[in-house]
Image (cartoon, grey):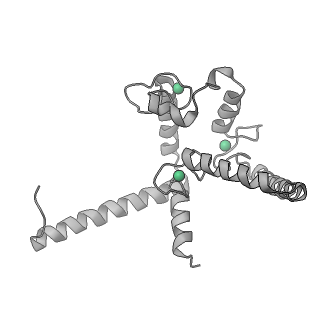
Amino acid sequence: MSFSRTKLDYLFAKQHGICVNCKTREAEPGKTLCLECQEKSRIKNRRALEKMTEQEKQERYRRNNERFRRVYAERKQKGVCVKCGKWKSVAGRTLCIDCLVKSRRRKDRRYNNEIERNERTEYGLCYVCAQPVCEESASLCRKHYELYAGLMRERNANPTPAMLEHREYIRNLEHARIEQIRERVRNGTFRKI
Ligand SMILES: [Zn+2]
Ligand SMILES: [Zn+2]
Ligand SMILES: [Zn+2]
């Protein structure tokens, strides 16, 4: 199978958790876009929706609904989270642990802070709960830093095929970089700083 350059870039970004739009920032967990691009796309969608006729709107809702149902059924059948499709769902539930926590949080007033999530880190506040960040992290409070560090450790101990591929990619990249330096040392073109 051959893909165009753009398609390859898209797939690469998606696979490595990089925003598929700006390709510079980290994508939100379980999403293909970063917070900033998500916000932009939300505004764009809202504007597009405002211009539509009632009939066009109905048609759009119908199509979205259809897609949602199809994806939901597929994921449920596979036993993966129906929301993000990334992780196994918790036994007896349709969501993974991340999405369960998130949905619980949405209903919790403590987390519905007046400072927007994408602005919190600028004020030195936890990206998740808007409490002050801890020393170890630029974007998380101690509680969330530890929670995520634990989750990441668990995931690193049980890597998914995509993660293994990413590790291989990083190893190859590092290998290529070292080879390049060796070559330059051999040629005497290595610049000592
Ligand atoms: Zn982005
Ligand atoms: Zn999920
Ligand atoms: Zn927090």
Image x and y of residue 113, in percent: 61, 24
Residue, far bottom: 2
Q: Is residue 126 left or right of residue 173?
A: right
Which residue is more in the foreground, 138 or 80?
Answer: 138
Can the viewer see residue 77? no
Residue 116 or 156: which is nearer the viewer? 116
Q: Nearer the viewer, residue 60 or 155?
A: 60
Q: Which residue is at 66% across, 33% downward?
A: 102
* Quarter holding residue 178: bottom left
Name the residue: 11% across, 74% down.
187
Point out residue 69 in the picture as x, y percentages from the top left corner.
Answer: 83, 53
**For residue 124, above or below residue 18:** above
Side of 67 relative to 145 (left or right): right
* Quadrant (top left, top right, bottom left, bottom right) of the C terminus: bottom left
Horizontally, residue 72 falls left or right of residue 189, namely right
Quick check: 50 left or right of 162?
Answer: right
Of 178 and 31, nearer the camera is 31
Question: Where's the N terminus, which quadrant?
Answer: bottom right
Q: Compared to 11, does 76 lie above or below?
A: above
**Residue drawn at (45%, 54%) of the image:** 24
Position in image of residue 104 (x %, y %)? 70, 28
**Residue 58 position within the rendered picture, expressed as x and y whole percent measured from the top left:** 89, 55
- Vertical arrangement, residue 73 with respect to residue 141, above or below: below
Labels in figure, total:
0
Residue 92 occupies quadrant: top right
Residue at position x 81%, y 55% in the image: 64
Asked whether residue 179 is in view, the answer is: yes
